[in-house]
Amino acid sequence: MMRLAMMIYSMSATVLASVAVAAALVSGVGSAAGLLGAAAAGAILALPTAWAIVRKMTGG
């Protein structure tokens, strides 16, 4: 189950970090620190998302 979680996390972290950076750019954030913070927030948000997806897939 951990291997599946890592694969799902790698996909969801990429998507959520990209969405967060795009949202930051649209809202006018132009600094490197702001964009890195948005990417980090997306990657952190992907952890519980990936875990929930894996639990639904495995039935647990």
Image (spheres, rainbow, N blue to C red):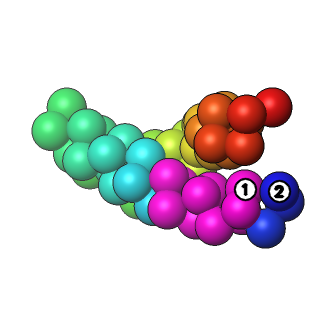
Q: Amino acid at mark 2?
A: Met
| Residue at x 71% of width, y 62% of height | 4
- Label 2, residues with CA under 10 Å away: few <14, some 14-19, many ≥20: few
Q: Amino acid at mark 1?
A: Ala
Q: Is residue 56 above or below residue 11?
A: above
Residue 19, percent from left and from top: 31, 45
Q: CA distance from mark 1 to mark 2?
A: 6 Å
Q: Please state the extent of the stretch shown in magenta in the rendering.
A: 4-13
17 or 54, nearer to the observer: 54
Residue 25, percent from left and from top: 21, 45
| Residue at x 63% of width, y 42% of height | 57
The kind of secondary structure element at disc 2 is loop
> Quadrant where the N terminus lies?
bottom right
- Label 1, residues with CA under 10 Å away: few <14, some 14-19, many ≥20: some
| Residue at x 59% of width, y 58% of height | 8
> Quadrant where the C terminus lies?
top right
Q: Main secondary structure of the magenta part?
A: helix
The kind of secondary structure element at disc 1 is helix
Residue 56 quadrant = top right
Q: Are marks 1 and 2 in contact (CB under 8 Å)?
A: yes
14 or 56, nearer to the observer: 56
Q: Is residue 9 magenta?
A: yes
Q: What residue would you read off at disc 1?
A: 5
Q: Is residue 37 left or right of residue 48?
A: left
Q: Is residue 8 magenta?
A: yes
Q: What residue would you read off at disc 2?
A: 1
Q: Is residue 23 left or right of residue 50?
A: left
